[in-house]
Image (cartoon, rainbow, N blue to C red):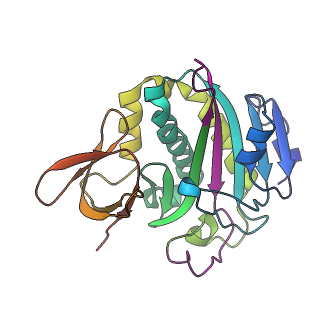
Amino acid sequence: MNLLSLKGSLPDIKKVFYFPEIESTNLYAKSSNLDEDSLVITDYQISGKGRFGRVWKSIPGLNLCFTLVKKLPLNLDELQLLNLYTAYSLVCVLKNLFPKLEKKLILKWPNDILLSNKKICGILIEVQNLKNKNKKFLIGIGLNVNQTDFPNDISENASSLKKESKQSSDISRESILINFIKFFYENLSLLKDRQALINSWMASSAIVDKKITYKQHEDGLEQTGIAKGLDNDCGLIIEFPDKKRKTFYSGEISLLYK
């Protein structure tokens, strides 16, 4: 990561911590009790984690791995909005930077980004000081940028910006990061307009009225239904073959394209 190109380009960030290699940017931010508006960046996470403790596999120096520390006055019933907002912010930036890929970039509930129906980004947000009005959030993002080869166990479901754009030269990770931070800070008011944020997220999700499979991690039960959108608490509404609808607040979905 070229820190010289970042210097002066992130006016909202007070401190940048860069590591060529680190166990986890979220773990460092947590264990170091970093102040808000701090940014932890690495070229390689040894133990990068996604949702449900999954390992985030990444080749050193090719992708974007960082954690943003931010305090926000969110109530307990608003915490899930930050997942939507972070993913929405990043997908807007990517669509702007890569207009040829715009129609292929979609949001997957609750906080993944797909490109050509393959995962390119995962987001893991941890919250501290739950009892405080201003809660501290550790917003961890892993974005596949220039990696074109993936391990066999994920090669069918993972991709990157470079691979899908078929660009010969490397894509600037710094440019993506700078634009994301700028968009994130400039549009924070969306977090206080719940319905506008949910509508904006759904407009970029392409899941409404699509056939999906839903898996509950508690029991591994997999069900098939039609995604009908999000409720006011960011839960996913699924309509099953018997026409009954149920709302889920955790789990994983897969879109069925055939």
Q: 63 or 7: which is nearer to us? A: 63
Relative to 157, is 204 on the left or the right? left
* Residue range highlighted in magenta: 127-156
Give x and y (percent) for residue 23.
78, 56
In-front residue for pair 23/145: 23
Residue 228: % across, % down: 24, 48
Farthest bottom residue in view: 152
Q: Which quarter of the rendered picture does the C terminus lie within?
A: bottom left
Asked which quadrant contains residue 180, the reply is: top right
Q: Does the magenta stretch include residue 131?
A: yes
Residue at 64% x, 55% y: name it: 142
Residue 34, given in percent of the width and then of the height, sits at: 78, 33
Above or below for 247 versus 106 = above
Instruction: Decide whether residue 1 is among the magenta residues.
Output: no
Q: Give how far across and how far down residue 167 sits, in percent.
A: 64, 70
Quadrant of the drawing holding the N terminus:
bottom right
